[in-house]
Image (cartoon, rainbow, N blue to C red):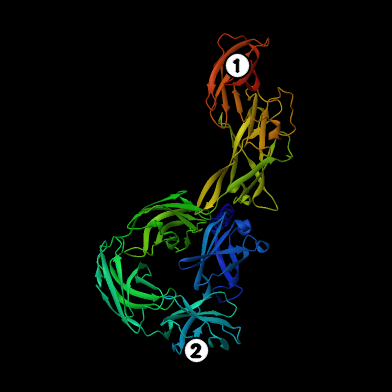
Amino acid sequence: MKQTLLILFLCCWGGVLLKGQSITSVVPSQNPVRGGEVLTVNISGSGTNFSAGSANYIAAIFGSTSVHGIVDLNTVTNTNMDVTFYVPCGVCGNADLSVTTPANGQMTYANAFSVSCGQITSVNPNVGTVGQNLTVGISGTNMNFGQGSNAAWVYFYDPATGNYLFPSTNPGGTSNSITVDVNIPQGTCNGSYDVIVYPGSNSCAITMPNAFDVIGNTGQITMVNPDTITPGQTLPITISGTGVNFQQGSLLVYFRKSNGQRFYATASNVSANSVTVNYTTPNYMCGGSYDVCVEQTPNTCPVCFEDGLYVNAQNVPAVITNVTSSPSPAQGGQSLVLNISGTGIDFTQGSSMYFMLRNTVTGAGVGSSFSAPISTNEVMAYFNSMPYDCGNYDLEVYVPNTCSNNILTYNNAVTVSSTLNPVLYSVYPYPSPTAGQLRLRLSGANIDFTQGSSMLSVRLVSPTTGTVLTGSNIIPSNFSNSIATVDFTPSVNDCGYYNLEVMNVPVGCGGTTTVGYHRLVGVNIRHCASNAPSSLTTHSGGNNNSIVSKVNDGLDGLEGENDLQILDATDVGSNGLLVQVFPNPMDEETTILVEAEEQKVLNFALYDVLGQQVKQVEFNSNERLQVNRENLPAGMYIYRILDATGNPLHVGKLEMK
């Protein structure tokens, strides 16, 4: 019989110990969807605690992109919830699901759902000439063109000149093909155009680069002399061409790098077929080949000579040398500031420079919200909200105007060590069913009180004596997991003020923390022991709406009904002092501690029952003062705390045994 019971006991507890938390299924309401669309999925789990609701963090990870999900609070149970994703443009493929809860930490589910990748596959015809009106057919996959003229929005764009071509009509097409009528106006620039399509009601653009060529202006540059220069050098450069007339309108001359960077020159001698510029090559001009371009009046079609000028320059390698983060380590969902230093980089380029942090494992990335250059070699980059994926992040810096790689990487620049920021908003008394018991109501965020004492522990800690009151019976609220009541059973020896702490609070990434309350909690038991502080007054700030806790030993006749008294700031004056006298009554010595928002010179004055001053000592606030009895007889004394000019700030009673 004993063996049977033992086997049953081990089986039951073994089942409990082997039970883990995991995602068991993800059921999309639409499958597949496209970038720019909305997807709602139902997530089921085993051994999970989803009831934290909005405190849960759900992300769909598409390679290097992480998409945040929004929890439908009306559907949440411990093992089930609906989550909506707004799939951004350009995101497609299979998504891995990451679910982080305060109770369970981070859980993953591979290939949870997929997003279709729209693609243009052909444009026919792909060449047109100036003045021509032609019908162009566009085909693709996963396009959802539908039928009719409202099925898609199509246009052609030349990134080199910034020119657009808009179809005159959209005759319509099938799901994956459409035809458009295109009129190429006179004066259209010669060049390659990207074909850009917004299929159906989708807000995402699908692009086929260099898909359509326009044969326009036939003028060309035939010679650049000299065709090689050195940074710092000043010399005339003559540009000659055919089929051009440089004397028509004003001229814009520039040298263009393959990355789009331009260096402008001023024309000094112009004829129909040639132009001369006196050019001083900047010292920071990178080495390599440049296109030589001339525009007859700005924003007209440029005439360019590809690789017409070569710059002899010693390329200075661009390197990120140091990155410091604040705070360090970083926290998921919270803002972050990076101080970035480097060489061979001009950080004053401003908005043309971009900063990205990318998780080294999941690829989840976040871009900077803005940057503030400190010097040419130093910049501050600001990130509004870090991803919730734990681990190390590499810094990627996109620098268009450098002489080397445009993307610079600094490995392991940032570490995200937590994904939740638990805080306590308020602590206040709550009716207790048992006499002599203290019940506190706690309110906070990112703290799942449903875990109860199996995970959390709550305590009161005296900052002066070290006394610890341990809370028991954590009772979560039935309408919010961030509210709970906690019971304490103090004795008359426990009068005083305390710091409140909630320990073992999950912060994600498998870690926990201790959350403290930013105000002192005053415990006021009727008939306090004689060593309790004679008076304690605290408040959190200078406005009249601040919460105040007050502890009293009954000397002024106050007998509170509650173990914790909460008073308004207007009831305690405006000096902002926290005065402690312990022990009181005293034998041979006692300690005076006056805490203030800033250090100040004070005086401690002691008077006998006849009003005669028997002792006065100068001391500083926020420092302990030891007061010796010396030869003073037993009895009751009055003490005053005075400022440096003798004005009284606080009055209390001190008893000598």
Please say if 98 is above or below 601.
below
Q: Is residue 333 visible?
A: yes
Element under disc 2: strand
Image quadrant assignment for residue 240: bottom left
Quadrant the C terminus occupies = top right
Percent of width and height locating residue 25: 57, 69
Please say if 320 is above or below 207.
above
Percent of width and height locating residue 534: 65, 23
Please say if 261 is above or below 475.
below
Residue hosting label 1:
605
Q: Name the residue at 35% across, 54% down.
A: 342
Label 1, residues with CA under 10 Å away: few <14, some 14-19, many ≥20: some
Percent of width and height locating residue 533: 63, 25
Image quadrant assignment for residue 345: bottom left
Q: Disc 2 and disc 1: Cα gap in Å?
A: 97 Å
Q: Kindly identify which numbered label has been placed on residue 134.
A: none
- Asked whether the beta carbons under mark 2 and mark 1 sit within 8 Å of each other, the answer is no
Q: Name the residue at 63% across, 60% down.
A: 78
Q: Mark 2 or mark 1, which is nearer to you?
A: 2
Label 2, residues with CA under 10 Å away: few <14, some 14-19, many ≥20: some
Quadrant the N terminus occupies = bottom right
Disc 2 or 1, which lies upstream in sequence? 2
Element under disc 1: strand
Amino acid found under the numbered disc labelled 1: Ala
Residue hosting label 2:
136
Amino acid found under the numbered disc labelled 2: Val
In the rendered view, does 124 fall on the left or right side of 57? left
Q: Nearer the viewer, residue 106 or 35?
A: 35
In the rendered view, does 414 fall on the left or right side of 16? left
